[in-house]
Image (tube, rainbow, N blue to C red):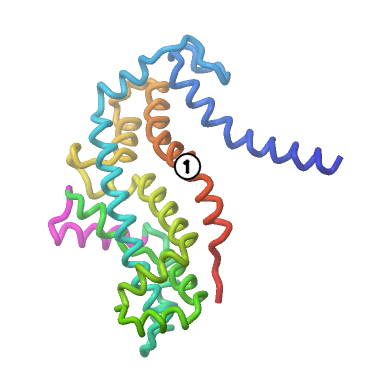
Amino acid sequence: MSTFLRYFLLILAAASFVYPFVWMLSASLSSESELGNLTLWPVGFTWANYVTVFSKIPLGRAFVNSVLVAVITTGLVLISGAMTGYALARLQFRGRNLIFYLIIFTMTLPFQITLIPNYITMVKLGWVDTYFALIVPFMLNSLSILLFRQAFMSLPQALIDAARLDGCGELRIIFQILFPNILPTVLTITILTFMGLWNEALWPLIVIRDEPTMTMPQLVTLFSVGGRADGQLTVKITAAVMLAIPIIILYLFFQRHFIRSMASSGLKD
């Protein structure tokens, strides 16, 4: 009975998470008049909503922009986070712990606090309506630094000493010797960073006004609230489904690595 109850609760919890998206998918394939039917199968099946979305907004260009920004920024986060985390974990210098605690402190600050200073910086640098405004403010991530530091501290010092004896420089030690030993941490940072960047809509809404440079979340948000959808709820839902599909496909391909990396990575002293 206890096993049955456990599985029943788990299935119920899973259904409560899956149902809203399944309903969204069904609604995107239904006509506007049949939207009120909360069924899991499209009523009045039609592709017209998807045709409307693609005809009213440049979704393809926005998709390319989102992929470009997310991939480049994720790569920079991995590089900068690994270098900073390695320095805080293995290099001896004055003020190392103070710097680490300051980085941890920044994790407690809401993004909205630094929103205006960051925007003013983008204006001063002339980066508004450019890809630099979407990439540079996110290229250094405090969570990635924390995870890399803890991962590097868990590795034996003898591994680093042996690499130095073989003539390896610090960068080669980080990316060629240590990276293969902390793959769960690398995958965790990669997945979380990419998903966070893909779903980011507030910052692009502030710094990007040129439509060819807009990301997919920004364009979908403006489409839904800006009047282009002409008040058609099914069209708005369709745009939201289009935004979610790439992340779902990505998860389906990497779900095994995602679960393994989340289970294996941790904060070790």
Q: Position of residue 177 (x, y in %)?
A: 39, 71
Q: Is residue 58 above or below residue 75?
A: above
Q: Nearer the viewer, residue 265 or 141?
A: 265
Describe the element under mark 1 as helix, strand or loop. helix
Q: Position of residue 143 (x, y in %)?
A: 43, 64
Q: Nearer the viewer, residue 44 or 60?
A: 60
Q: Which residue is mark 1?
A: 251
Q: Is residue 71 above or below residue 85?
A: above
Q: Position of residue 122 (x, y in %)?
A: 19, 58
- Which secondary structure class fits the magenta region best? helix
Q: Quadrant of the image for the N terminus?
A: top right
Residue at the far front in the pictured view: 166
Circle 1 Cα neighbour tier, 10 Å, few/some/many (<14 / 14–19 / ≥20): some
Q: Position of residue 192 (x, y in %)?
A: 44, 53
* 117 with respect to 148 (left or right): left
Residue drawn at (30%, 73%) of the image: 171
Residue drawn at (49%, 17%) of the image: 35
* 138 with respect to 182 (left or right): left
Residue at the far top in the pictured view: 44
- Please identify the quarter of the rendering in which residue 267 is found: bottom right
Residues drawn in magenta: 113-129
Residue at the far right in the pictured view: 1
Q: Quadrant of the image for the C terminus?
A: bottom right
Q: Nearer the viewer, residue 61 or 108?
A: 61
Amino acid on which disc 1 is placed? Tyr
Q: Is residue 128 magenta?
A: yes
